[in-house]
């Protein structure tokens, strides 16, 4: 049977655009309140960053494990499974707020991280059938779709909190309750619509890979390390991906507390997070176009420079609501967009097809673990020295992004 690959690619991207929009609503609606809920149930501002930290940690682990599933069963099964786990985690977070359990909140946040892993994995799924000259644009289109739900999500924090109080639930659990619905709907959509499976179709078109009888497939990590040794650009791409994501997460998770200390209410905090998310996703098609036309490496380096500017603004922002925090968070998101689109496309460009999901899952594992560490350290630094010190210290990560872009451009290109 002959399959129209262009038609299959269009259907894949269209399906992922919808699932990203709905799934992003589910995952981002709790961003503005996660640290506040963690502070309330734990009774400590130093522990306020733990919910986001474990969510990011859950994202890292889920990315790796779901990549193993997708390597065998394809994108459709892996993505749907991730959404199911994330929906369960969101419900557990609601229960944690009701009973006042920090342990339950950590469990729920960890499981909820699977949804972010799926959103991250969807950007790779958009490239399985894409031509080389359009990979960045296909990837960035799916990243852009997150804007729809992600910008709306934090702004629904206030109404969701009011609804929760009206039905007898703690205010801060409302965003997680509404998020559960969005995550579940996204999973159902992927299960029904992602046919044919883009990864399985790409492998079918490429032809079977010869494997000696009795040979056990190595772990994803070992396969990824081997690929990085054969294609050195992969190592620098992962460094840029991890450093940029860690810089964004470390500063972003502490912003709600910094603003609340100055008297900003939940709706204003939600608006700032929405502006930040707008920077992360809304401009990604333009970023993808630049990455295809100018090159992935220069775009990656520019992403690091934008992060440097954003961190300078955040380090000078007073507590509460200010122009500096609005602009700083917008640029923090934009720098993340440049970094993520460019570095992710480099990963796709240089990862051999037969180990593509292994490399992608391992890259997202490193990215997630780095961000989890950054989130955990951010809470300690902010509690001990303040938010401005946190932002100033994060400059080191932005410089690593710039270095990754420069070094990647100087390496020879090898066929994946």
Image (cartoon, helix red, strand yellow):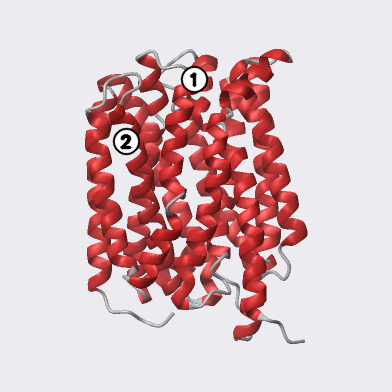
Q: Is residue 291 visible?
A: yes
| Residue 411 sits in quarter | bottom left
Among the two numbered marks 1 and 2 on one chain, the one whose residue lies closer to the N terminus = 1
Of circles 1 and 2, which is in front? 2
Figure check: 226 above or below 17: below
In the image: residue 85, left or right of residue 48: right
Question: Within 10 angstroms of label 2, few (less than 14), some, or many (20 or more) residues?
Answer: many
Q: Which mark is residue 266?
A: 1
Give the SS element for disc 2. Answer: helix
The mark total stands at 2
- Give how far across and how far down residue 12 sits, in percent: 64, 66
Q: Quadrant of the C terminus?
A: bottom left
Which label sits on residue 22? Answer: none
For mark 1, does the 10 Å Cα neighbourhood hold few (<14), some (14 to 19), or many (20 or more) residues? many
* Quadrant containing the N terminus in the rendered view: bottom right
Mark 1: which secondary structure?
A: helix
Looking at the image, residue 211 sits to the left or right of residue 39; the answer is right
Q: Identify whether 130 is placed above or below 52.
A: below
Q: Which residue is mark 2?
A: 327
- Nearest the eye: 249 or 151: 151
Q: Which residue appears at 53% of the width and 69% of the height?
A: 127
Q: Residue at x 57, y 49 (%)?
A: 62
Taking depth in this image into account, of 320 and 254 the one nearest to the observer is 320
Give the percent coordinates (x, y) of residue 390: 27, 31
Image-quadrant location for residue 319 = top left
Residue 329 rendering spot, x and y as whole percentages? 35, 36
Decide: is 342 above or below 173: below
Residue pictured at 71% horizontal, 50% vertical:
187
Real-space CA distance between mark 1 and mark 2, rounded to the nearest whole angstrom:
18 Å
Q: Are marks 1 and 2 in contact (CB under 8 Å)?
A: no
Q: Is residue 212 visible?
A: no
Q: Is residue 258 above or below residue 300?
A: above
């Amino acid at each position: 049977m002959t399959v129209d690959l262009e038609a299959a690619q269009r259907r894949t991207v269209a399906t992922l655009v919808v699932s990203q929009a709905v799934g992003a609503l589910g995952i981002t609606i709790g961003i503005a309140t996660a640290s506040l809920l963690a502070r309330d149930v734990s009774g400590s501002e130093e522990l306020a960053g733990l919910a986001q930290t474990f969510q990011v940690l859950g994202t890292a682990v889920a990315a790796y494990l779901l990549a193993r599933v997708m390597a065998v069963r394809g994108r459709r099964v892996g993505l749907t499974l991730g959404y199911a786990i994330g929906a369960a985690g969101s419900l557990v977070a609601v229960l944690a707020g009701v009973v006042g359990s920090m342990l339950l909140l950590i469990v729920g946040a960890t499981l909820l991280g699977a949804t972010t892993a799926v959103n991250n994995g969807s950007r790779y799924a958009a490239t399985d059938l894409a031509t080389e000259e359009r990979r960045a644009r296909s990837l960035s289109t799916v990243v852009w779709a997150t804007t729809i739900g992600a910008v709306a999500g934090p702004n629904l924090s206030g109404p969701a909190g009011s609804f929760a109080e009206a039905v007898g639930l703690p205010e801060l659990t409302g965003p997680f309750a509404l998020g559960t619905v969005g995550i579940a709907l996204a999973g159902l959509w992927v299960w029904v619509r992602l046919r044919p499976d883009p990864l399985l179709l790409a492998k079918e078109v490429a032809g079977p890979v010869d494997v000696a009888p009795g040979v056990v497939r190595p772990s994803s990590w070992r396969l990824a390390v081997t690929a990085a040794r054969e294609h050195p650009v992969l190592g620098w791409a992962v460094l840029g991906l991890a450093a940029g994501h860690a810089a964004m997460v470390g500063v972003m998770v502490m912003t709600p507390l910094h603003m609340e200390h100055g008297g900003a209410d939940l709706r204003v905090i939600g608006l700032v997070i929405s502006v930040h998310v707008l920077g992360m996703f809304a401009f990604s098609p333009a970023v993808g176009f630049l990455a295809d036309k100018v090159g992935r490496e220069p775009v990656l380096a520019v992403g690091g420079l934008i992060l440097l500017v954003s961190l300078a603004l955040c380090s000078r922002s007073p507590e509460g609501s200010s122009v500096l925090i609005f602009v700083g968070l917008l640029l923090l998101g934009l720098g993340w967009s440049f970094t993520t689109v460019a570095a992710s496309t480099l990963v796709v460009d240089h990862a051999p097809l037969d180990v593509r999901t292994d490399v992608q899952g391992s890259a997202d594992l490193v990215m997630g673990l780095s961000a989890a560490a950054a989130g955990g350290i951010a809470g300690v630094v902010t509690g001990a020295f303040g938010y401005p010190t946190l932002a100033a210290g994060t400059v080191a990560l932005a410089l690593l992004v710039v270095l990754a872009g420069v070094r990647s451009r100087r390496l020879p290109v090898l066929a994946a």
